[in-house]
Image (cartoon, rainbow, N blue to C red):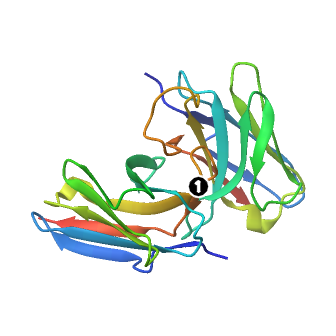
Amino acid sequence: DQQVKQNSPSLSVQEGRISILNCDYTNSMFDYFLWYKKYPAEGPTFLISISSIKDKNEDGRFTVFLNKSAKHLSLHIVPSQPGDSAVYFCAASEDSGYALNFGKGTSLLVTP
Amino acid sequence: DAGVTQSPTHLIKTRGQQVTLRCSPKSGHDTVSWYQQALGQGPQFIFQYYEEEERQRGNFPDRFSGHQFPNYSSELNVNALLLGDSALYLCASSAPQGIPFSGANVLTFGAGSRLTVL
């Protein structure tokens, strides 16, 4: 049973515009949420995280928003750059140090 | 600074065989986790090792077993291979819990070992 869902398999955005990647989850016990980015032939790399006590976390061009009541989080990338083209995975865990539950990923393409 | 290294990068086995995959964690990390990523799917948690003990386990059969060595490196063993075991196997390491970090389980992943079962 998929507890973390990324319903958009792919997204195409023009360079300089905003990219918004969405993620839904079903387990109300999840307390930590993370986004990972994956390039071909590389392992996923950590991008940004948020804990359930916050509703927003920002790091440079990347912002993650959490709506606990809707069990929804989103990743905003502003402005988008061609180097951001990658597969983005949403992940969640019940506690720090616990196993991560991943979504299936969204493939982002940023075109010049 | 070397990150997480995995070997082999690619391998082909036949049904019923056994396979061993190896992982060296990032320097300073003491916890190793293994994930299976099937084609078109996100990584699925197999198990986590800390202090040479299996600390957590995902929904995988006993054919999947592991080991952690005193130097924190780890092995993943899969017995009686099935066609469905074909996947990218990712190893990830994380820092000791006592070191301040974001509060989330920030894993550093290796590039993976791609297993094909024929």
Identify the residue at image location x=77%, y=24%.
Answer: B69
Label 1 lies in what chain? A
**Which quarter of the figure is the C terminus of chain B placed in?**
bottom right
Residue A79: percent from the left, percent from the top? 13, 60
**Which quarter of the figure is the N terminus of chain B placed in?**
top left
Which quadrant of the figure has residue A53?
bottom left
Q: Is residue B55 left or right of residue A57?
A: right
Badge 1, how many Cα within 10 Å: few under 14, some, many 20+? many
Q: Is residue B73 left or right of residue A97?
A: right
Residue A60, relative to residue A104: is it above or below? above
Identify the residue at image location x=76%, y=41%.
Answer: B55
Residue B94, relative to residue A94: is it above or below? above
Residue A94, relative to residue A17: is it above or below? above
Identify the residue at image location x=21%, y=65%.
Answer: A110
Residue A36, relative to residue A69: is it above or below? above
Q: Is residue B67 left or right of residue A100?
A: right
Q: Secondary structure at mark 1?
A: loop
Residue marked by disc 1: A100
Residue B52: percent from the left, percent from the top? 79, 29
Q: Of B8 and B102, which appears nearest the observer?
A: B102
Residue lying at the far top of the rendered structure: B71
Instruction: Specify whether residue B118 is in view.
Output: no
Identify the residue at image location x=78%, y=67%.
Answer: B83
Number of numbered callouts drawn: 1
Residue B67: percent from the left, percent from the top? 80, 34
Instruction: Specify whether residue A40 is in view.
Output: yes
Q: Of A30 and A36, which appears nearest the observer?
A: A30
Q: Is residue B5 left or right of residue B59?
A: left
Which quadrant of the figure has residue A54?
bottom left
Amino acid carrying mark 1 in the image: Leu
Residue A27: percent from the left, percent from the top? 60, 71
